[in-house]
């Protein structure tokens, strides 16, 4: 199992680093769009499979006397969520502000001619929700269903949980101001993302090896039986130390860099546990298997989803 994990990492990490380092951030936005799309498919497939034998929404008309509507996330909202990272790249220039939220951003840094719109993302949400409602209406037209609100809610949750949170990483990457790291000229957003990924990947590896070596006290047996308090503290300590190291790489005050690292050490592991709770709710071990040894996209990027907004909040304003 460890060998498979390492082989997958040896292939996947260089490709992901290439997406981060490519100037302009366009390749990273495409990568996030692809990952969000795969994540949405994993989420939909897992919940469709889990509810495949349900009987919550039974037809009442003559044409649907014996039909059953399966509970599943609304596909229109899933597509919208998958496209969110690319949409953010298209309409949001440079470094947005927290107050803009999902709706817009401030003028870009290093992006000539960018014209951010405060309405584009709001309009996309409105259209996606309206089309999602029409999709569910079409289902109910054929077979009156009690699962309409469930399907819409699950689809909207998946879109926000996966696509919207991944879009924060795109916003972080869109700081295009040139800077230097160890003699290499890179865009500042690329360095910030490399810093984040170093904390997440090395912290996760530290938790894995420390947990296997000396882990004795279970952290959350009902959610993730393999996780231990020893591994959790090792993860946090690693993120904190790497966070402090980022002070020199990014020219940050030591207290700020340490706070960012501590936040990543906490939020990353909370994201992992939250994703575990989603899997346990439907009796799934993994959301997918596209990354051998690591599970699916959601299994590998669960910590990233919760951590990217935190780093953007500190650095992307």
Image (cartoon, rainbow, N blue to C red):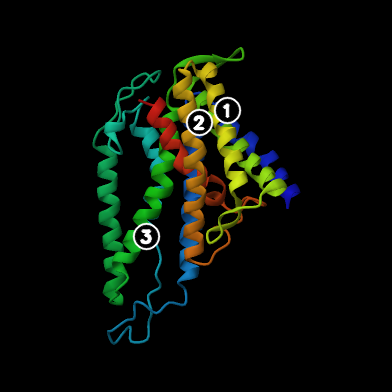
x, y percent for residue 133: 27, 61
Lower sequence index among marks 1 and 2: 1
Residue that numbered label 3 is attached to: 154
Is residue 274 among the parts visible in the rendering? yes
Q: Is residue 79 left or right of residue 206?
A: left
Distance, label 2 to label 3, CA atoms, is 32 Å
Q: In which quarter of the image is residue 158?
A: bottom left
Residue that numbered label 2 is attached to: 261
x, y percent for residue 179: 50, 14
Q: Residue at x 54, y 30 (%)?
A: 240
Distance, label 3 to label 1, CA atoms, is 38 Å
Q: Residue at x 51, y 63 (%)?
A: 280
Residue that numbered label 1 is attached to: 241
Q: Nearer the viewer, residue 46 or 241?
A: 241
x, y percent for residue 210: 68, 43
Q: Nearer the viewer, residue 128 or 250?
A: 250
Q: Nearer the viewer, residue 315 or 28?
A: 315
x, y percent for residue 19: 55, 32
Q: Is residue 269 left or right of residue 294?
A: left
Which element is circle 1 on?
A: helix
Is residue 77 among the parts visible in the rendering? no
């Amino acid at each position: 199992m460890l060998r498979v994990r390492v082989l997958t990492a040896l292939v996947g990490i260089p490709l992901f680093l290439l997406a981060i380092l490519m100037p302009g951030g366009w390749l990273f936005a495409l990568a996030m769009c692809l990952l969000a799309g795969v994540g949405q498919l994993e989420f939909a497939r897992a919940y469709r499979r889990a509810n495949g034998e349900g009987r919550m929404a039974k037809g009442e008309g003559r044409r649907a006397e014996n039909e059953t509507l399966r509970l599943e996330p609304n596909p229109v909202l899933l597509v919208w969520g998958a496209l969110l990272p690319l949409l953010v790249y298209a309409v949001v220039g440079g470094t947005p502000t927290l107050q803009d939220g999902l709706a817009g951003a401030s003028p870009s840094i290093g992006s000539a001619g960018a014209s951010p719109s405060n309405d584009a993302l709001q309009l996309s949400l409105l259209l996606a929700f309206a089309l999602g409602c029409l999709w569910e209406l079409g289902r109910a037209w054929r077979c009156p269903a009690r699962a309409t609100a469930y399907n819409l809610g699950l689809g909207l949750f998946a879109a926000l949980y996966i696509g919207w949170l991944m879009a924060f990483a795109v916003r972080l990457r869109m700081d295009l101001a040139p800077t230097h790291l160890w003699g290499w000229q890179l865009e500042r957003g690329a360095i910030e993302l490399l810093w984040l990924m170093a904390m997440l990947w090395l912290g996760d590896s530290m938790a894995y090896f420390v947990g296997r070596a000396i882990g004795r006290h279970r952290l959350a047996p009902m959610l993730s039986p393999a996780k231990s308090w020893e591994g959790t503290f090792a993860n946090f300590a690693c993120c904190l130390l790497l966070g402090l190291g980022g002070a020199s790489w990014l020219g940050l005050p030591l207290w700020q860099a340490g706070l960012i690292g501590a936040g990543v050490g906490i939020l990353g592991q909370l994201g992992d546990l939250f994703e575990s709770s989603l899997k346990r709710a439907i009796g799934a071990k993994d959301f997918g298997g596209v990354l051998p040894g690591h599970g699916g996209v959601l299994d590998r990027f669960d910590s990233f989803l919760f951590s990217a907004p935190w780093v953007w909040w500190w650095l992307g304003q």
